[in-house]
Image (cartoon, rainbow, N blue to C red):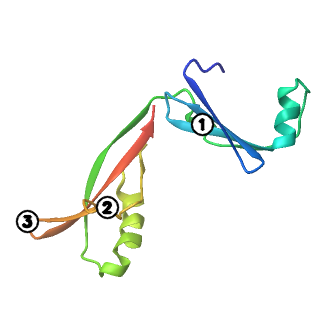
Amino acid sequence: MKLDDARITILANDGEVKIELKDAKSSVTFARVSMTAEQFVRALSRTSYCDCNCEVFGLEKIGKQHENKTFEFEIPKFEYNERQKKTAEIAKTVCPDGWLPDTYFGSKDSFFEKDGKFYARCTIRRWI
């Protein structure tokens, strides 16, 4: 697969170099490589097959268009200290098919009341 809209980030600090690869279309970072400074210098000197640590993920989203929107849903009234955790569980069950909910409910707009009912608001995402 060829990516026409890929991005790379190279960060060097404290004797370690971190490289991230991101598909701009899907807004997904799909690879992270970490190397010691010595390994990185070896790679820059055109040595082949240098050792590194590599993590690859999110490949099923690569090349797809990222969409997101706000999703509001009704919830029961929870005790304050348990509402974020329980609301995250509910969000996963009421989210429309094909979408994934962001389960962060720590912002001031995450919860609201309308017509005597309690609601939660989050961002949902999909890749098509």
Give the residue at x 91% y 27%.
47
Q: Is residue 89 left or right of residue 79?
A: right
Q: Residues within 10 Å of mark 1 (few under 14, many from 20)?
A: few
Rendering quarter of residue 91 = bottom left
- Pinpoint residue 74: horizontal percent, then vertical percent: 24, 63
Q: CA distance from mark 3 to mark 1?
A: 41 Å
Q: Nearer the viewer, residue 56 or 12?
A: 12
| Nearest to N terminus: mark 3 or mark 2 | 2
- Pinpoint residue 117: horizontal percent, then vertical percent: 15, 68
Give the residue at x 40% y 64%.
88
**Figure disc tally:** 3
Question: Mark 3 falls on what kind of element?
Answer: loop
Kind of residue sitting beneath label 3: Asp
- Pinpoint residue 109: horizontal percent, then vertical percent: 24, 59
Q: Is residue 37 left or right of residue 121?
A: right
Q: Residues within 10 Å of mark 3 (few under 14, many from 20)?
A: few
Give the residue at x 43% y 40%.
126
Q: Which residue is mark 3?
A: 115
Q: Nearer the viewer, residue 77 or 106?
A: 106
Q: Which residue is mark 2?
A: 107
| Nearest to N terminus: mark 2 or mark 1 | 1
Kind of residue sitting beneath label 2: Ser
